[in-house]
Amino acid sequence: MSSKLRDLIRQVRACKTAQDERAVISKECAMIRTAFKENNVAYRHRNVAKLLFIHMLGYPSHFGQMECLKLIASPNFPEKRIGYLALMLLLDSKSEVLTLVTNSIKNDLTHPSQYVVGLALASVGNLGTGDMGRILIADVANCMKGSNPYLKKKAALVMIRIFKRVPEMIEEFADKVVVLLKERTHGSLIAGVQLMVCILELEPTQASNFARLVPSLVRLLRNLLSMGFSPEHDVAGITDPFLQVKLLRLLQLLGVGNEEASDAMNDILAQVATNTETAKNAGNAILYQCVAAIMSIEAEAGLRVLAVNILGRFLLNRDNNIRYVALNALSRVVNQDMDTVQRHRQTIVDCLKDPDVSIRQRALELIYLLTNAKNVTDLMREMLNYLVVAAADQKSALCSRIMEAVDKYAPSKKWRIDTLITMLSIAGNSCDDAVVANTILYVTTADGLHAYTAHKLFSLLNDELSQLALLHVGAWCLGEYGNYLLDPCPPGAGGASDVGNAEEPESPGYPARTAGELCDLLEKIKKCHLATPRTRAVVLTCFAKLSQRLGGSAHARVMEHLAQYKESMDVELQQVWSNILLVPAICLERQSYRRLTL
């Protein structure tokens, strides 16, 4: 005598420990195996039901797979129901046993009872493989053409599964989908629309065949916008938002690259965009899909402006999810309508102050796309402000992006140098070597700004030595242009920071520095806690350059400092000292060459 399922559940719940539970399950599995071997037909469905409970607890249940097939072949509906349920739970699409059940499913698809057909359709929709789809697609299509709306809805959803597994069958059965758009039953209609969306996503070439349906879809969407058309499917006062979203997605796919279809749907899209209520989340979902449709089809310019303005309103919403979606959508449409998106630039910049890191990251990516020669000054200022509070793992990528924007859109050489030096003073420890090398290159090519750059870097390094990249750039520039520090740098010596901005304040003046102050700063850099062997090598190279450019007592002090590394344990630093010995000879050789050429 087989125990009932409720008795097994009661025994499992009464177990105090996991060991007790395993003992109960092991005993019950042994009894179920014995019943299967004895071919106990009367209690087969009960044993399979208990096996489903055991499967949900996480215990092995593979030994009951063949019993599922026997239950499916049974003429009784209760046994079929348990069999199909077990089939969908105990098996997956990779199971070899599925090949044995295909014939039973095919027979059930033509069963007089709609509930048996529904079970067969549900099993195909959950487990259908490519081979099973090729065999059963004709029977599923017949169910879709029938008069029963319950089966039509299920058949349409099953066709989605089959088309995804067997895309080559789309061309043969695509025309049979059109009949679902004439359905008055809500479930069949929305399933049919989703099936058409699936077809167009898998085979975009089918859009030309479905383009004739645009007027019908527009009429259907207009009816949905009418109050009271389908009150039983309202959500928060919005008429059937799920069907509206599906229809907008279908119109979007049909209007891509088709001017005639786009013209037919322009008016209804404008109506949806202007009349949909934004106080509810369902309305926001419809507006988002409407914006996606407008930006994808060949829409009018005014309609595109309306779509971007809707996304701009989304940015002002207090819901983080809506703001995130709006930033993503604006990133996709910024290349299509840059000027309209620029109108919402300040709102986008304000998103950098949002507590949610994901919103800050999306806003930052959008700011990269918005940067051009007209707004680079303002946007780089905001990005530098964000760099101060950015996470450590984001600073390296942010510095590289700032470097790219400065390289492409810098209004003047002085502004470029000021921006890069400010960036290095904020996140110099996170910059890669390419940023340091490019900064040095820009300083080298700015011929009239060498004195200004040397004084600016000297002042920054004299106040703080906390950024390694700034140390390297500063040490290199002081070695090349340190002699300019002996003379004062008057205010505005470098020219306007921004050629097109008259309100930009002129650069401050810097007093003259002595050679001793310069040497003190370099020694301070060398002894800094951040200094690496590379930093000390850069400083020694700087001293080597200054030994030929500074005279008097400073020259002697430089040489005395360099002599400390004559026998350094670091081979690189010792090599710097060896190269310094060759400097006077090289200079003498160059003078002799000049005399010979003259």
Image: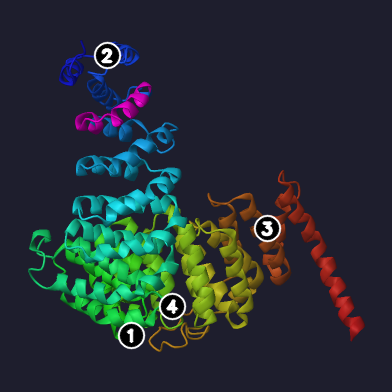
Which numbered disc flags the more N-terminal residue, 3 or 2?
A: 2
Q: Nearer the viewer, mark 2 or mark 4?
A: 2
The amino acid type found where label 3 is placed reads Leu
What kind of element bears circle 4? helix
Which numbered disc flags the more N-terminal residue, 1 or 4?
A: 1
| Total residue callouts | 4
The amino acid type found where label 2 is placed reads Glu
What kind of element bears circle 2? helix
Q: Mark 1 and mark 2: span between their CA atoms?
A: 70 Å
Compared across the picture, whether 233 is left or right of 263 comes to left
Disc number for residue 363 = none
Q: How is the image coloured?
A: rainbow
Q: Mark 4 and mark 3: span between their CA atoms?
A: 37 Å
Q: Nearer the viewer, mark 1 or mark 3?
A: 1
Magenta range: 63-81
Q: Mark 1 and mark 3: span between their CA atoms?
A: 62 Å
In this view, the residue in front, 151 or 320, is: 151
Say which residue label 2 marks.
Answer: 28
Disc number for residue 301 = 1
Disc number for residue 376 = 4
Q: Is residue 225 magenta?
A: no
For disc 4, the neighbor class at 10 Å (few under 14, some 14 to 19, many from 20) is many
Say which residue label 3 marks.
Answer: 540
Q: Nearer the viewer, mark 3 or mark 2?
A: 2
Which numbered disc flags the more N-terminal residue, 1 or 3?
A: 1
Q: Nearer the viewer, mark 1 or mark 2?
A: 2
Q: Mark 3 and mark 2: span between their CA atoms?
A: 82 Å
* Residue ID at (38%, 87%): 503
Q: Are marks 2 and 4 in contact (CB under 8 Å)?
A: no
* Residue ID at (43%, 72%): 369
